[in-house]
Image (cartoon, coloured by chain):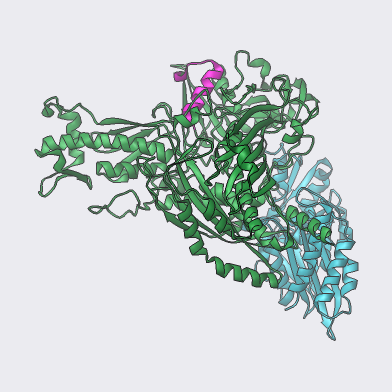
Amino acid sequence: MSVPTQGSGMTWVGRSIRRLEDPALVAGQGHFTADLQAAHWVRFVRSPVASGRIDRIGVPPNANVITAADLAGVKPIKPMLHKFSYVPVAQPVLAADVVRFVGEVVAAVVAASKEEAEDIADRVEIEIVPLTAVTDARRALAAGAPVVHPEAPGNVIVEGRIKTPDFDATRASAHTLIQFEAHSRRQNATPLEARAGHTAYDGATGRVTLTCTTQMPHLTRTAIADVLGMPESDLRVIAPDVGGGFGQKMSLTPEYVILVWLARRLRSSVAWTEDRRENLMAGFHSRDQVITLEGAFDKDARLTALSADIIANVGAYSCFPTTCGVEPLMAMAELPGPYQAQAYDCVSRGVVTHTCPMGPYRGVSRPVITFALERLMDKAAARFGIEPIEIRRRNLIDRFPYKSATGLTFDEASYRQTLEMAVEHIDLPAFRARQKQARAEGRYLGIGFSTFSERTGYGSPAFAARGMEITPGWENVEITMDPSGLVEARIGSSPHGQGLRTTLAQIIADEIGVEPRQIRVVHGDTDRAPYGWGTFASRSLVIAGGASLIAAQKLRTKLLKIASHLLEASAADIVLEGGMAKVSGTDRSLPIATMARQAYYQTHRFNGEIDPGLTEIGAYDPAGTFSNACHVAIVQVDIETGHVAIEKFLVAEDAGRIINPMIADGQVHGGIAQGIGNALLEEIVYSDTGDILTSTLADYLPPTAREVPVIELHHMETYSDASITKAKGVGEGGAIGAPAAVINAINDALAPFNIEIDEIPATPRKIRATLRSAMEKRA
Amino acid sequence: MKPAPFVRHVPATVGGATDMLAEFGPQDGRILAGGQSLVPIMAFRMARPAHLIDINGVAELARVSRIDNTLSIGATVRHAAFHRPVADAEMGRMLSTVVRHIAHYPIRTRGTFCGSIAHADPASEWCLVASTLGAEMVARSKRGQRVIAAEDFFEGIMSTALAEDELLTEVRLPILPSQAHFGFYEFNRRAGDFAIAMALVTYRVTDGVIAEPRVGLGGAEARPRRIPEAEAALKGRPLEAKTFQAAAEAAAQAIDPIEDIQADAEYRRELVRAVTRRALERSVP
């Protein structure tokens, strides 16, 4: 590892040290679920029909096939929310009488090999009497629409409403009203590693170990134990190396429940590795929303009132633990974004349909609401005849703390400053000149801005506000220095590619004076790590990082006490650095490793003043903080084909203190790549009868390296008191801001045609169709 | 394994392969060359051949050779063989221009020219080349050998004139005449994706006007083909924007577009107009 040695006065925090997790990964030494061998392999038989009654399941002779009839005593997955008119709906682990989406698990084939399981699954005959399916949320809301769950006759299972007292009066006094519909089509997070699970049974204890590709090992344990009616401690859940999750791996999947059930039933090991087709059909979908948005502006283009009707298509079931409220309720709470609109009126509904269940995906609703709100700002700028940057200057929050219309407290951030930083680096006047010249030559260039806030690192109060039955939020970290001076930090959070083993080690290293590579961060194992909530919602660095800092500070205090005894100096005069405890201004010092031995083996020397051992626990449960950024895209639209090429992508972002700039940049890059996919390429398409038409990667199109431009990044660091490490979350911002910037740029490019594209993805076919109808109207 | 069960046979000679094909062809037997189209379809179990006759070990099929004015391409010649010119002048340049649009590098090192022809995906670049240049397909079976002209070979989407006992041993491409012009343009959503529409044009210039024009379209209809209406718009006309525009318009009007989730008929017609004109623009040095 080529890490420069720590010099006096230098901190590990703030340095781009190489990721401690990478040597194993790049050398093929990582541990992934699908590497595990098992005595039994499972192939799931899935419904080919979107809606219907199961008439018969024909099982080939001598085959071991599990159906709902075998699962007596297994409860359905039924996540609960105690607010927002939530209608709980049950998802049977195996479809019992009816099927509700193409890809729903109907049976599990168990065989001695993957190959045999595939072949047997091929011969299982499912006879389903088809019923009328509804795949579109608006159609599901219409009178007489097919009912997906009898408990919810109108197909609405969650509904949030908010209206500030001043809304009607403020809207009535508006100078300009702008209303439009923003559409976001359905997407799949497409992690590189699809789902996989492996269960092993221990005959001695009766315990089952589930190894699976999850973002939340403890919550998976809790959920499965509840559904199967077993004590939590009889189940161990391990998340080994995980090849990306992006939210898709933070909901409970019925497949894992069946694997645990099978391991107990067979008293043996059982494994399943999902293929890409299953993942695209049944691995959770996201962002299928329609937002009708209206902005009321005063004569100076200041947004005074905002109203929205949000319809989120949540698919056939409600996901655990967030429930399907995660999209519509987050959209409602955070829609006003970084702008100072205090009058707000919003209705937000989650609508069930015969499609794959919705699950959170990087940014959750925020890529959609940011796209909608940023379209509104650009439309208003055009109406007022001012530059898009000017309308943002007039409306961005600039005083802190700021209390939003929905009651959120915005901590210190740099909305205006990041906008100005981006504008300065992009050279807007030069671009406008180039754009004009290009238009004269028949080339259509456009620039798009997106300014947004990214709520990150929020603890249990924020989740409690949603009324979740199981309320996540806090994190515990246990740090132990062993007798040889090596440090182990056990965290409840569960990274799956974010580099947390490195960044937490950097935070801890600065406190206790050892190098990051001497700190092993242990995660993803319910037997080894304290209960924690996992990695999602841009929370781990803030919350597990805060808990690590607290635990490390306690350990530091203890080490200083020990050093004070052994060096016979005041603790205040001792510094811990470079693996040594040193008495300032003297040449007296002691290796920290020596102190560690004494803490275990020479405790009698401390006269009972210091407890034996070197383990400390830190707990952290913050209210939350907001990161922010300005994204700028420059695109060229080929008006003949509708193709969009991104010429430049620039980001000015502020995620507070950056622990490791290289890792932070990587997070932004990855998020933007997904955001570009969302803006231009990725769309799950269902036929009217509920067949999924995009079940392979030949039809569902994530961006490749060729579609993602070089991204120019600029950082700003605002140190907010909302985070004890001063770090804010950075996991989702790239994905949140990019679609809006790209779509605004396309609209800017096409401004001469007087058309508006208010839909993601903006596929070439749709762009052409919009241009065509504009030209036909003109003709 | 994802595919349904099958038996793999490994002939060493063309004769061995055609013997096997005579036996297994009628029992759901298929030829396996590069496998870049067949194997994914098998993994989805959309194709379930009971027998695969793997011709990768047949040495005599791995050759590219020039005989007079014909380029002969054997059945196991990989796409990657065309990254560098395999023939002089325009012919070599044309093939190395087109090959870069076929999927991605790893796929090009494995997939074969003749495999693409036999698979007959309407979006295949090589099928477009074969149609535009008027290639001849050499089919061998235990019954003998026959030569099939491109216009008779491609029958529809993934459907050809090959009988179930016939092996496509070779494709013969006419070499472009000296001083030929060519232009190729492909539209797809991401680099390496299947073409939603593409055009290949070739012609010569005599006395300042276009002679022997060929305009081929792929990805737009059920099979690639030359578009006589577009060729008529070029023949005898000077190389100018107006000519290209007229040919592009003629091509757009002439086609019977396929529809899929990427493109409806109207959009495909627009794309045909654009790719035809752009292929023509690229044909001008």
Q: Is residue A223 magenta?
A: yes
Identify the residue at image location x=26%, y=34%: A554
Tell which of B92 and A485 is nearer to you: A485
Above or below, B125 against A439 in this view is: above
- B5 displayed left or right of A493: right
Instruction: Inspect this view and state whether residue B148 appears.
Output: no
- The quarter in which the C terminus of chain A is drawn is bottom right
Instruction: Inspect this view and state whether residue B189 appears.
Output: yes
Q: Is residue A377 magenta?
A: no
Tell which of B27 and A3 is nearer to you: A3
Above or below, B250 against A283 in this view is: below
Which SS type dominates the magenta stretch?
helix
Q: Where is residue A243 in the image (x, y as percent from the top left)?
A: 52, 41
Identify the residue at image location x=80%, y=56%: A773
Figure quadrant of residue A38: top right
Q: Where is residue A3 in the image (x, y as percent from the top left)?
A: 32, 53
- A684 displayed left or right of A77: right
- A651 displayed left or right of A723: right
Instruction: Specify the colour of chain A.
Output: green
Tell which of A185 and B51 is nearer to you: A185
Instruction: Specify the colour of chain B.
Output: cyan
Q: Position of residue A714 (x, y in %)?
A: 45, 58
Q: Give, as a single range, the part of the protein colored magenta.
A: A216-233
